[in-house]
Amino acid sequence: MRTIDWVDGAIELVDQTLLPDRCVMLRVTTVDELIDAIRRLAVRGAPALGVAGAFGVALADGDTAAIARLRAARPTAVNLAWGVDQAAACLPQGRDAVLDRALRVRDEDIAACTAMGERGADLLDGDSLRIMTICNTGGLACVERGTALGVVQTLHERGRLAEVLALETRPLLQGARLTTWELARMGAPHRLVADSAGPYLLARGGVDAVLIGADRIAANGDTANKIGSYALALGAARAGVPFIVVAPETTIDAATPSGDHIEIEDRADHEVVEIRGVRLAPEGTRTANPAFDVTPHDLITAIVTDRRVIRP
Ligand code: MRU
């Protein structure tokens, strides 16, 4: 199954807001519909956003204002702007050239995820690995296979995976809703973990490696990823557990010197105050809701991309 694709002149994508209860394809025919799908996380995950951005330019029919709005729909994952820019650079050559480039962005993601899966699995020692991860970095965050969860999938296919400990990933529960769904479809053994249990489980010695994805990697290796990643990195460093970032080269932003320069998206109060319409806190409660955090490069053991392994 592809998470996102171009079908008969429009974008078709899995509406991730409905998972795990229902797996429904959403057909997107305008840039405004795509921006709405991106903002409400119907499509999400840095590589999938890159493909969405590229396909979105093909929908925009040369409307540069719409393309600029699409580029800015979510600020932290550099892949969205990158995908838009790749396709927009072909505008002078006409609509076919734009679509052609967008289709190649899709195909390059599929190839990159296969390469990352193999490189990441080769990097890890051991035949019975217990992997901790956060958010969703599987095929749902990309096109077919994932980044960090792509490594997990390759380990599982090679018979080297003992178990995945998947963090819930409050507030929007990408781990609980999406990662467990993908792991179950793979037939990979897994347990769901409350976010706050992550660092203690690392300290207790039940984890061989932490694998995470990335939304933007600065030139010095500082990595923005889903909120909660930094706490896991601190816990992993203290416990002496390898903390590995798995991301395509397209997530490296050489123009951003360090994590301090990465814009972190703050999201709405209701995401923290409610779960699926059920209020958890007194009415009117205000929140702090950063969607991402930055892990400093000195806490990262290695960054695995589709082309190389980068160490501090
Ligand atoms: O807010 P989301 O769900 O788009 O956040 C996604 C993440 O933080 C992922 O870890 C990251 O995009 C890498 S996905 C392969």
Image (tube, grey):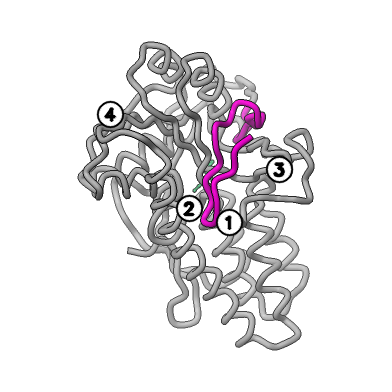
Residue type beneath disc 1: Asp
Q: Earlier in the sequence, mark 1 or mark 3?
A: 1
Kindly report the distance in space between the C-alpha atoms of the residues bearing marks 1 and 4.
32 Å
**What is the crowding at mark 4: few (fewer than 14 residues within 10 Å), some, or many (at least 20)?**
some
Along the line of sight, the residue nearer the viewer: 145 or 45: 145
The answer to whether residue 124 is left or right of residue 43 is left
Kindly report the distance in space between the C-alpha atoms of the residues bearing marks 4 and 3.
32 Å
Circles 2 and 1 in contact, beta carbons < 8 Å? yes
Per the rendering, the mark at residue 218 is 3
Q: Earlier in the sequence, mark 1 or mark 4?
A: 1
- Image depth: mark 2 or mark 3 in front: 3
Task: Name the residue beneath numbered marker 2.
Answer: 42
Residue type beneath disc 2: Ala
Residue 84 at what x, y percent from top left?
67, 66
In the rendered image, the quadrant that contains the N terminus is bottom left
Residue 112 at what x, y percent from top left?
48, 60
In the rendered image, the quadrant that contains the C terminus is top right
**What is the crowding at mark 3: few (fewer than 14 residues within 10 Å), some, or many (at least 20)?**
many
Per the rendering, the mark at residue 36 is 1
Residue type beneath disc 3: Ala
Residue 269 visible, this angle: yes
Q: At x 71% / y 88%, what residue is drawn? A: 93
Per the rendering, the mark at residue 215 is none
Asked if the residue at label 4 sits under 8 Å from ligand 1, the reply is no
Q: Give the range drawn in magenta.
A: 289-312
Circles 4 and 3 in contact, beta carbons < 8 Å? no
Kindly report the distance in space between the C-alpha atoms of the residues bearing marks 1 and 3.
27 Å
Q: At x 58% / y 60%, what residue is drawn? A: 50
